[in-house]
Image (cartoon, rainbow, N blue to C red):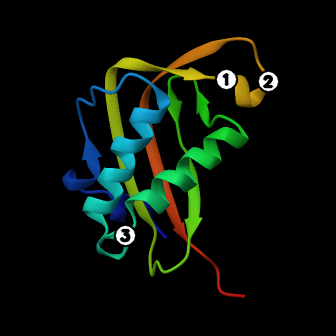
Amino acid sequence: MIYSDLITEKNILLGLDTFDSESTLGALADGLVECSPELKGRRDEVFDALREREERGSTGQQGVAIPHVQLSGLSKTAIVIGVNSAGVDLDRKSTRLNSSHVVSSYAVICLKKKKR
C-alpha cells in the first residue's frame, strides 16, 4: 500500500478551528466519513474508535498526532489529514504525564481489519 495514493485534496482538512482533542477527533471522524464511502453512517463508530485509541496513549509527538484504528468492513485504508494552525492542547492524563502539549496537525488512518 502506498499512502500517497490514498491522499487527495478531499482528504485534507485545512483550517480546523477545533479547540481540544475531543472536538478535533470529531472533525476528523466527520472528514473520514465524508471521504470514505465505506464509512458512511459510521461516524459515531469512527469517533469512538479514535477516542478510545487516544485514551490508551496519545499519538501526539512534536506537533503531529497520528491516531490510527482498525475497523471492520473496509476494503482499503482510509486517511484524513487535519491542520489546526492555532494548535490543539491535548490532555495527557491517559499517558500519566502531568503536562499537556500542543498538536497542530493530525493524520488519521483507519486500517481495514485483517481477516482471520
Disc number at residue 96? 2
101 or 20, which is in the foreground?
A: 20
Q: Are marks 2 and 1 in contact (CB under 8 Å)?
A: yes
Task: Work out how far the residue at label 3 is from the one at label 2, CA to CA, in angstroms.
Answer: 32 Å
Image mark for residue 39: 3
Mark 2–mark 1 Cα distance, whole angstroms, equals 7 Å
Give the residue at x 27% y 62%.
Answer: 35
Counting residues from the N terminus, which is met first, the one under dot 3 or under dot 2? 3
**Type of amino acid under label 1:** Arg
Q: Amino acid at mark 2?
A: Arg
Type of amino acid under label 3: Leu
Judge the density around disc 2: few (<14), some (14-19), many (≥20) Cα neighbours within 10 Å.
Answer: few
**Numbered label attached to residue 32:** none
Q: Residue furthest top?
A: 99
Q: Which residue is mark 1?
A: 92
94 relative to 54 in the view: left or right? right
The reply to whether discs 3 and 2 touch (Cβ–Cβ < 8 Å) is no
